[in-house]
Amino acid sequence: MNARDTTANRAHLRGWGGVGAMALLCALAVAFALLLPLSQPHNRGDAAAAAGQSVAHSTRVRAEDCEDPQNQSLSPSGGNGETPTLDAIKARKDRRLIVGVDTNSYRWGYLDPNNPAGELEGFDIDLVHRIAEDILGDRDAVQFKAIPTSRRIEAIQKGEVDMVVRTMTINCDRIEEVAFSAPYFVTGQQVLAPKTSTIKGYDDSLAGKRICSATGSTAYDKLEADKKNRDLPASADISTTVPNQLDCLVKLQLGQADAVVTDGALAASQAAQDPTVELKGGLFTDEYYGVAMNLKAEDLVRQVNRTLESYIAASDGWRASYEKWLHPTMDKPGEKSRSATPPEADYK
């Protein structure tokens, strides 16, 4: 990149709610640095190995038999009393919960370039701290690992993390590969585009437009299916994909994409980062976020569901976190969004 290109790119960037372009790029650089350990070979983690040895019933559900994937999690009560995964976590020399998170999703899991402490913060991060407190008695007993969207399932299956708490949608394909908690958030897919764009939403106005989505995301799955079924204009270009969802916003800012399709909750946060973009049209799918874990870590799944029940009921829990992080970007004056109410758990 030459000096002219660099100047032009800086002029286009408007991220992090008024923070300059270089702050955004610094945050992305930190996230990339955190990702480096995950690009190296890993041995299967102790808790994952314990889960693999468990004789408990499998949490697997066949995709073709799946109707309501968000209602397939295990009840907090029940089980055979054995807790191999939890025991392995508590027995570690470095007694911390290992959690895969996002480090560049504004208000969900991110490193604020203006925060001198350099600590991760956001809605998902609050939930991780509560889970750690319930399991280990210390809300800070967490080792965070930055996981790109495209590696969430792989990181769980390889035992690199105990769980992933990263705006991860529960769906029928994924519940064959990982176990989910009960849902802790509800949203849907939405379109993000420049305010000056002629795009109106997820409709014919996307004809001839370059649409960006994250690899391995439900947004890309939806785009691919609708393109195949001709529910999306044939001229819409969905070939622009990125490992991390926030990279789509950067491509939008640099003029390398015309629109982004992602969860409405994430899109709202990105619109708050950049005043030149906005949400186009309404939600066009239903998305339920869950905590993802190893398929055989039944004791951990039940424990996380116990935490979710108490977290949602507590005055300093789910609602307080929503008000702090998401209310400013998701709720209109005098009007609460659908996401402002936690989803009710309905176990299988």
Image (tube, rainbow, N blue to C red):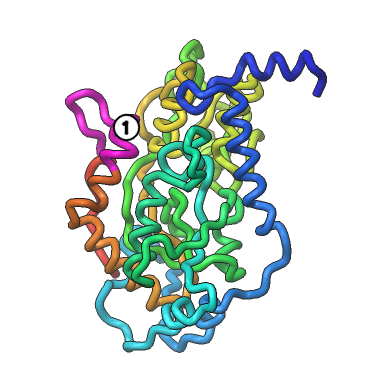
- Asked if residue 175 can be seen in this view, the reply is no
Residue 297 image offset from top left, x and y in percent: 45, 76
| Callout 1 amino acid | Met
**Quarter of the image with the N terminus in it:** top right
Within the magenta stretch, is there residue 183?
no
Other-residue count near label 1 (Cα within 10 Å), few / some / many at <14 / 14–19 / ≥20: many
100 in relation to 1, above or below: below
Residue named by callout 1: 330
Left or right: 180, with 2 as reference point: left
Q: Quadrant of residue 269?
A: top left
Residue 229 image offset from top left, x and y in percent: 53, 39
334 in relation to 312, above or below: above
Residue 226 image offset from top left, x and y in percent: 51, 38
Q: Which residue lies at the image location 25% right of the left edge and 34% below the top edge?
A: 337
Residue 187 image offset from top left, x and y in percent: 35, 42
Q: In this view of the protein, which residue sits in the foreground, 218 or 248?
A: 248
**Quarter of the image with the C terminus in it:** bottom left
Write the start and end of the magenta stretch as one range.
Answer: 322-338
- Asked if residue 10 can be seen in this view, the reply is yes
55 in relation to 132, above or below: below
Q: Which residue lies at the image location 64% right of the left edge and 19% below the top edge?
A: 255
Disc 1, SS: helix
